[in-house]
Amino acid sequence: MATPPIGHRTKDFRKLFCGVRKKLQKIFRTQNEIFIIPSSATGAMEAAIRNCVDKKVLCLVNGAFGKRWADIARLCEKDVETVEVEWGKAIKPAIVERKLRHNKFEAICLVHVETSTGVMNPLNEIAAVVKKSGALFLVDAVSSLGAIRVEVDKLYIDVCFTASQKGLALPPGIAIISVSERALNKSRSVKSKGFYFNFELLLERAKNDEPLTTPSTSHIFALNKQLEKIEKEKMINREKRHYQLSKLCRSLGKSKGLEIFSEKGFEAPTLTCFKNTLNLNTNALLKFLDSRGFTISGGYGPLKGKTIRIGHMGDYKLKDIKLLFDAFDEFLKGL
Ligand SMILES: *Cc1c(COP(=O)(O)O)cnc(C)c1O
């Protein structure tokens, strides 16, 4: 990121931009077009709705980010229906199938890893149900992609996105979005797409390896470097490391008397969400851990104080989790 910025309409930048998008296609496991947009992940959620939905959309909701996506669709004045599942539980394919039996939607929105509850929804199984319905499949892979495999082409995911600050372990500031031919075609017929996230306009520029508007060049340099590092680690090892991190985190938490909040069998490999079974003052815990150099979360939104979330996506090592729980021990001893 410290590389001095270069003009975004220069040949050097086009070369960098082209290379980065090619590397991203490998991470997304897709031949689809990749757009890099100057927003956080929420911008990509909005982009997916504004480009791929004229009227009817189905949002699958089992946590704060699924809810946010439905809220965005409503604010964009779409006709929104939801399938809602209790927070902490996973969305099962059967409930989606039932909804689709008597209803038709232009697009279906799914959050792969629901970061607010630590649940990983069964993406492959839901993808099969969506495919049968013929609807566009829009997937928020913010807390999975870049950490674990997400098979965009194999699962026929029409729009898939992440942001720099989660699985890719970069500073926040850009979102990355893959868009299928089907989604691009749909966007051509959708009105009121605005300018900033307009797929047609983004595509026109992308064909020439250019961004639509001025990008954060610092992020593109950093992304290029990080993608080289991921290639060196290999996605398969990166994924394995995340499964090891979550397994260790769960077992250390359990050994201290914490229970897992997320439904059994659907625990995310990228973060662990515990029930606050020890009735800890989560604010005091967070403050203590911060003094030891660790940042965790005391529960998202309505789960504040009720859960403890430990994010371990990106470049963390097993040792980091061990050191975190050493500090946790120190906190418990001081009570
Ligand atoms: C963090 C997150 C978002 C939103 O991210 P911002 O970058 O803050 O806009 C969306 N979806 C999921 C699953 C997330 O974890």
Image (spheres, rainbow, N blue to C red):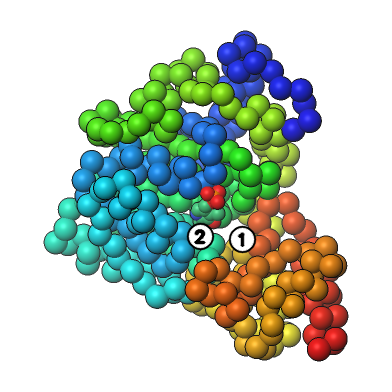
User: Relative to residue 279, is residue 292 drawn left or right?
Assistant: right
- Which quadrant: the C terminus? bottom right
- Front residue of 264/54: it is 54
Q: Position of residue 198 (x, y in %)?
A: 38, 30
Q: Are marks 2 and 1 in contact (CB under 8 Å)?
A: yes
Mark 2, other Cα within 10 Å: few <14 / some 14–19 / many ≥20 = many
Q: Residue at x 27, y 43 (%)?
A: 53
Q: Position of residue 130 (x, y in %)?
A: 29, 53
Q: Position of residue 296 (x, y in %)?
A: 70, 66
User: For disc 2, does the CB lie below 8 Å from ligand 1?
Assistant: yes
Q: Residue at x 60, y 18 (%)?
A: 8
- Which quadrant holds residue 90? bottom left
- Front residue of 65/29: it is 65
Q: Is residue 104 above or below residue 261?
A: above
In the rendered image, which residue does mark 1 sit on? Answer: 270
In the rendered image, which residue does mark 2 sit on? Answer: 113
Mark 1, other Cα within 10 Å: few <14 / some 14–19 / many ≥20 = many
User: For disc 1, does the CB lie below 8 Å from ligand 1?
Assistant: no
Residue 129 visible in the shown view = yes
Q: Could you tell me which secondary element the residue under label 1 belongs to?
A: loop
- Which residue occupies the extreme top position in the image? 11
